Image (cartoon, helix red, strand yellow):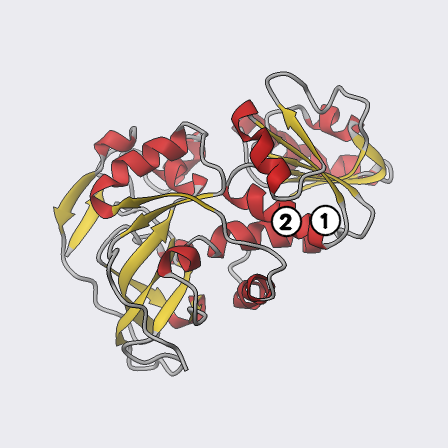
Amino acid sequence: MKAAVYTKYGPPEVLRLKEVPKPVPKENEVLINVHAVSLNSSDLEFLTAKPAYIRMFGPFKPKYKILGSDIAGVVEAIGSKVTRFSTGEAVFGDSFANGLGGLAEYVTIPESALIPVPNGMTFEEASAIPQASTVALQGLRDKGQIKSGDQVLINGAGGGSGSFAIQIAKMYGAQVTGVDNAGKLDFMRSIGADHAIDYREEDFTKNKGRYDLILDFVAHHSIFDCRRALSKYGNYILVGGSVPSILQTLALGSLLSQLGNKKMGMLLHRQNNKDLRFVVELIEAGKINVIIDKTYPFEQTTEALQYLMEGKVKGKVVVSLKNEAPIPKNE
């Protein structure tokens, strides 16, 4: 089978389309004929080894040589103990916990990480949902305890998880401020943001705003600066960002939370099919939308990753392996 393989850390140009052995599913796994893969910031992190802690998985060369965790496709074969799926079904899910591997013609993934593709949804749309949407949901609803009327700031609101976060926060009745680059201001407003800030022109930790909830996808401020931007009972949640910000939040977040009413912490994303199904229900009900900026053919995976690296993506970017493939109808 063909796969987008990288054997050393570096920019997207280190990827090569190569022939590799087709995987064989274990007893609890499903072999997926991959139709679409959406890209996440985690793919860039594993590709470039930035931040440096990625090298824990492979100090000198990548442990996982095929990127891509959010996949959608058709069941090709099943392991001996698989009971929920059969060959020919359209499915999607997150293979992150199974070592990535989605940017290939076939990938194996535990059946517990998959759900059926809803009828009427494309493979591209399905692949754009798993990680980005559930990170946003868990950050806002579970860790953030969002409620109607909250003043919510989302840093990095124009990307994949951020675009879901804006919509979910508005669904819960919050007033939303989105922070990203100038090229995404109109986009953030178009999907529900009440206010949009260009981070190059305005530092949200220094303005007059005070927020009940800050969801930070691209943390680089001091934890003390973020704490000052919170309301009296505010909640700061770091999802991703620079190593200093992550280490500072891990080291001091709990202590600062005990010193007053403001809460400071980090989201540990959980692969959770219950949450994934909940997001699908919201999409089917028309309460939120899947937003895909660009779709690239498999042969242009390098270009897709380069576009993601440039920070221009509004919503999600998807790699399509089978543009003309029909979608099986799930019963």
Q: Label for residue 144?
A: 1
| Mark toward the start of the polypeptide (1 vs 2) | 1
Near-viewer residue (64 or 212): 212
Residue at x-position 81% and y-position 31%: 210
Instruction: Characterize the local packing of mark 1: few (<14), some (14-19) or many (20 or more) Cα atoms within 10 angstroms.
Output: many
Residue at x-position 33% and y-position 31%: 306
Q: CA distance from mark 1 to mark 2?
A: 15 Å
Secondary structure type for disc 1:
loop
For this view, does 39 lie left or right of residue 207? Answer: left
Q: Label for residue 167?
A: 2
For this view, does 307 lie left or right of residue 156? Answer: left
Q: Position of residue 86 (x, y in %)?
A: 32, 80
For this view, does 160 lie left or right of residue 287? Answer: left
Q: Position of residue 235 (x, y in %)?
A: 76, 41
Secondary structure type for disc 2:
helix
Residue at x-position 26% and y-position 70%: 25
Q: Label for residue 273?
A: none
**Quarter of the figure with residue 91:** bottom left
In this view, 134 is above or below 116: above
Q: Position of residue 218 (x, y in %)?
A: 56, 32
Q: Name the residue type under label 1.
A: Gly
**Quarter of the figure with residue 156:** top right
Quadrant into which the C terminus falls: bottom left
Instruction: Characterize the local packing of mark 2: few (<14), some (14-19) or many (20 or more) Cα atoms within 10 angstroms.
Output: many
